[in-house]
Image: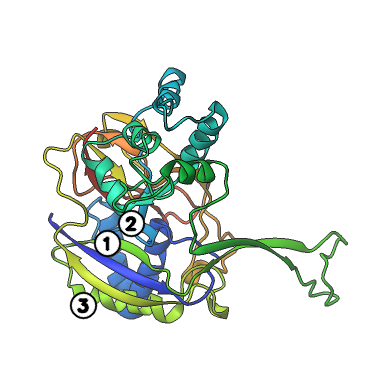
Amino acid sequence: MKYNTYEWKISPKSSFLTEIESDILFGHFIWAMKYIEGEEFLKKKLDEFKDGNTPFIFSNGFLDDEFPFLKKINLSIEETKEFAKLLDGENNKINQRTVVLALKKLKKYKTIDKEVFEELLLNKNEKDLYIDIFNMKRDPMTLKKYKDDILDKKARFENWAEGKIQKRSKVVVKNIMKNKINRLNNGTEQADGSSGLFSDTETFYNSNAEITIFIKVRSDIKISQVKKYLNYIEDTGYGKKKNIGKGNFKTISFEKKERIFEEINNPNGFVVLSNYIPIKEDFSEIVSGDIMTKRGKLGGDYSHSEKPFKKPIVMYKPGSLFKGEIAEIKGQALNNIHYNKDIFQYGFGFCVGVKI
């Protein structure tokens, strides 16, 4: 079955308590479908997901066109020593400590600019980027090639490595302490007398921040339906505590895309831009996999049920890289993750071809 790809850009208008992840977005989407279309319509669509003929494939949300930093190779100690040698030129001496600091900072980068991401999709690997950085050909903060004349690239590099200049972030993540209310005595402690304190991780966005989400829509699905479901999510909010104004956003655009990245001829691997549960036939080799353990919580009508949590599962994070043929559908709807057998975990991968 053929799919069309759409780009959904949104602008956060409040703080978020829940990250925009493909499986969570799927949950919001199907509840919107139920409330708009009815339960019988939803059941038919859910059967299609379970049969592997998924009507929709969601990516995670990506802030300001930054995407996962692909790790194509494992750098050895000897290779990292080469970077120091690049800095031994007569006009560009630098001590070993600065080299170590720079490598530590580079290895912590989780996301990169879209332009650099496309370079990695095509023919570059992270070692190529590091060589350019230590040769003062790339900005260490953006990893993009220098286009303008920088008067003192060496000083910029050293200041960055020493932490004197930093990449500006459009988000602030805070752990906010709150009190649980004891309904028996209207106090701020639990019935057994223990502390009622807990923390919420809250993300605050700058006013000009934009989040990009990609959605593959099966060609037989009317796009007018998809827009209705997305409008419903926009009207009702996203994630935890949306009923009190968290997860509020506005749609900037929703557009069909013939391609979202530079076209790659004959890719021999793929990277996922979503949370992903593979099946055995999906790939031939794991190049670099970043995993997480997730215990999903039910939403919609099930959110107040006696057992609102799913069983713990392991999922690959966006940026995980695999060798294998690219295909429209990768991953699965994982069953047996709750006592209610109708419930499953959405684990289809939004995949992009890559040269490895």
**Is 352 positioned to the left or the right of 266 in the image?**
right
Residue at x 83% of width, y 77% of height: 186
Identify the residue under disc 2: 59
Identify the residue under disc 3: 224
The residue lying furthest to the right in this view is: 193
Q: Nearer the viewer, mark 2 or mark 3?
A: 2
Which comes before the other along the chain, label 3 or label 1? 1
For label 2, count other residues whose C-alpha is less than 10 Å away and answer few (under 14), some (14-19) or many (20+). Answer: many
Mark 1–mark 2 CB contact (< 8 Å):
yes
The correct choice, above or below, for 321 with respect to 96 in the image is below
Residue at x 49% of width, y 59% of height: 168
Q: Secondary structure at mark 2?
A: strand
- Display coloring: rainbow
Disc 1 residue type (three-letter): Ile
How far apart in space, not on screen, are marks 3 and 1 (Cα)? 14 Å
Disc 3 residue type (three-letter): Ser
Viewer-nearest residue: 120 or 234: 120
Q: Secondary structure at mark 1?
A: strand
Residue 302 screen position, x and y as percent? 50, 67
How far apart in space, not on screen, are marks 2 and 3 (Cα)? 20 Å
Identify the residue under disc 1: 215
Which comes before the other along the chain, label 1 or label 2? 2
Instruction: Work out which quarter of the rendered image holds the N terminus and state it.
Output: bottom left
